Image (cartoon, helix red, strand yellow):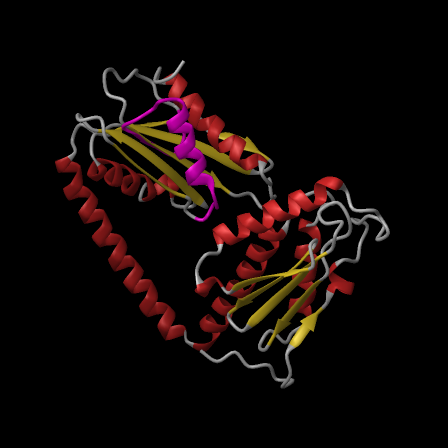
Amino acid sequence: MEKNNTKGEPERFDSVNVNQGQKSYDSETSPDPDSFTQQQEEIETLREIYTSEEDGLEITSVGNRHHKLRICIEGCELNITLPETYPLGNAPPSVFISNWLGSSEQLKALKEELNEIYLPGEVILFQWVEQVRSFVSEHICVLESQSSEESIHEATDLQQSETHDKELRLQNASSLYPNVQIHHGEPFCIKKSTFQAHLARVKTVGEAIFVYSKLVQDKELKKVTHNMMAYRIINSDGTIIADNDDDGEAAAGSRLAHLLEIVGAENVIGKDPNLENRIELSKSKIVVVSRWYGGILLGPKRFKYICNVARELLVKCQLIR
């Protein structure tokens, strides 16, 4: 796929435009004592999230209190410089450069999206990076759809074939795990996002995988944005098998795994926590939490909502008190 800029030079917008608007503090504001700590914690979190070279993230330290971030995405670059006052001062100066996104309207739309995310006092680097990733991906999809309608039809046929194969595999798996029951929690809605938990008693990793696969193939859950999952299985010899999956909601799976660990819940897999009957004897469980994203960013509070629906389901099932 070729992504050409008809002007022949990279298009860009810089921090002068990105940071326009009312959402800023005086640039002369003295650095808050907590700013450096918050900045360091966010940098470390980004390093943990973007660990692969394919993620294209470069973080450079400039002096003791400054960092520069550069992330390359499909021929586009997002460069961010963190001032001493971030996150309590002005929005970080940012430059977006693209060799193929040449439309001023496209760049204006991206600037507005980044401006909407910025709030003084809130860490926003992850949201900015992911917003740019989504923006670039959407425009790649548009180019691909315009360049090859036939390829789209082929991809659709392939997807339908794969879906059919998955349904057949689930039908066969159902005969292997006839006693596995999945319980669903009540949906919790806030700011246009909806969270719903699912819970099941499992004894093996195979059962956990079966439960998760069955949930994500459920017709009522087809439009879910994220299906975060965690399970803990305790074997007869006392050994524990545990795993989790964020499904695009960074760090959500590990939060669910931590919840299962601190409440002593094993042999459970789930998405959201609403179980009607008490599970006797076995501590092995899988919990899955589904999120339908409504277009409004919830920030770190989303982790509280994810864990709350899971905990409520565990309590309802009388797996914890």
Q: Of 104 and 288, which appears nearest the observer? A: 288
Q: Of 207 and 78, which appears nearest the observer? A: 78
Res. 224 visible in picture = no
Q: Residue at x 65, y 84 (%)?
A: 7
The percent coordinates of residue 32 (x first, y second) are 77, 42
Q: Is residue 269 magenta?
A: yes
Q: Residue 221: name its quadrant.
A: top left
- In screen coordinates, is 305 left or right of 88? left
Q: Of 131 and 266, which appears nearest the observer? A: 266
Q: Residue at x 46, y 27 (%)?
A: 309
Work out whether 183 lies above or below 213: above
Give the position of the C terminus as an image quadrant.
top left
Work out whether 150 lies above or below 301: below
- In screen coordinates, is 306 left or right of 208? right
Q: Is residue 48 magenta?
A: no
Q: Residue 275: name its quadrant.
A: top left
The percent coordinates of residue 153 (x first, y second) are 35, 68
The percent coordinates of residue 136 (x first, y second) are 54, 65
The percent coordinates of residue 144 (x first, y second) are 45, 72
Q: Residue at x 54, y 38 (%)?
A: 193
Q: Of 164 and 65, which appears nearest the observer? A: 65
- In screen coordinates, is 304 left or right of 241? right
Res. 65 visible in picture = yes
Q: Which residues are magenta?
A: 248-273
Work out whether 9 lies above or below 288: below
